[in-house]
């Protein structure tokens, strides 16, 4: 128990913190015992919060806090520079590597959107998939158009042949 006349180990604390020490009864402990109890309380609080202090994100006070948002993005895995986005394994469905110019545009877009580094390859893969689906659909439309055109030409040829070789009064 602390001597009433000697300075206490928490004398340098502000009024709020001193009141907390007294309310918890830590003021009655010698400094070593108090430190042990405070450490146990800290560990208990850390478990209650659910994450260690180094994993807690401090949100910026407003949208203009550039450094605050940079720190939040860093904790979320957003690279500091666009060149830190990696697109290993981004290929077309036929296994052909993605075009380097496309990957540069994807890198710039990922940086603009502040995507985590792990999300950028997925973005690039999805854009390639959408592009390939559009190309496949265009090929299908072109094939159908050719089929209709060819079918139409065959129908015209058939009508011409019928008009030349089938008597008009017999019809078809």
Image (spheres, rainbow, N blue to C red):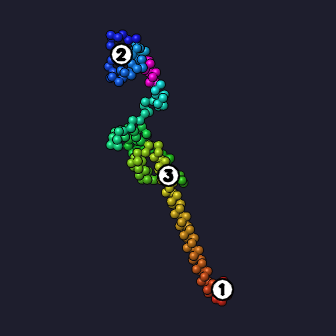
| Residue 55 percent location from the top left of the image | 44, 33
The CA span between labels 2 and 1 is 116 Å
| Badge 3 element | helix
Residue designated by label 1: 171
Is tag 3's residue or tag 1's residue first in the polypeptide sequence? 3
Is tag 2's residue or tag 1's residue first in the polypeptide sequence? 2
Which quarter shows the N terminus?
Answer: top left
User: Does residue 97 appear anywhere in the picture?
Assistant: no
Q: Residue at x 55, y 64 (%)?
A: 140
Is tag 3's residue or tag 2's residue first in the polypeptide sequence? 2
The CA span between labels 3 and 2 is 61 Å
| Residue 127 percent location from the top left of the image | 48, 53
Q: Which span is picked out in magenta?
A: 35-43
The CA span between labels 3 and 1 is 57 Å
Q: Which mark is residue 126?
A: 3
Front residue of this view, candidates 71 and 143: 71
**Do residues under tags 3 and 2 come within 8 Å of each other at their CB atoms?**
no
Q: Residue at x 38, y 43 (%)?
A: 81
Q: Is residue 39 magenta?
A: yes
Foreground mark, 2 or 1, reads 2
């Amino acid at each position: 128990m602390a001597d009433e006349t000697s300075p206490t180990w928490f004398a340098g604390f502000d009024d709020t913190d001193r009141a907390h020490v007294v309310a918890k009864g830590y003021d009655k402990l010698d400094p070593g015992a108090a430190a042990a109890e405070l450490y146990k309380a800290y560990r208990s609080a850390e478990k209650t919060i659910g994450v260690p202090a180094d994993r807690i994100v401090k949100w910026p006070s407003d949208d203009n806090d550039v450094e605050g948002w940079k720190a939040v993005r860093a904790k979320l895995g957003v690279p500091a520079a666009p060149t830190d986005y990696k697109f290993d394994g981004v290929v077309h469905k036929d296994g052909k590597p993605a075009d380097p110019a496309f990957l540069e545009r994807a890198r710039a877009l990922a940086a603009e959107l502040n995507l985590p580094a792990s999300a950028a390859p997925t973005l690039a893969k999805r854009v390639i998939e959408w592009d390939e689906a559009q190309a496949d659909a265009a090929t299908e439309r072109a094939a159908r158009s050719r089929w209709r055109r060819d079918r139409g030409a065959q129908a015209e040829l058939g009508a011409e042949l019928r008009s030349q070789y089938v008597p008009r009064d017999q019809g078809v």
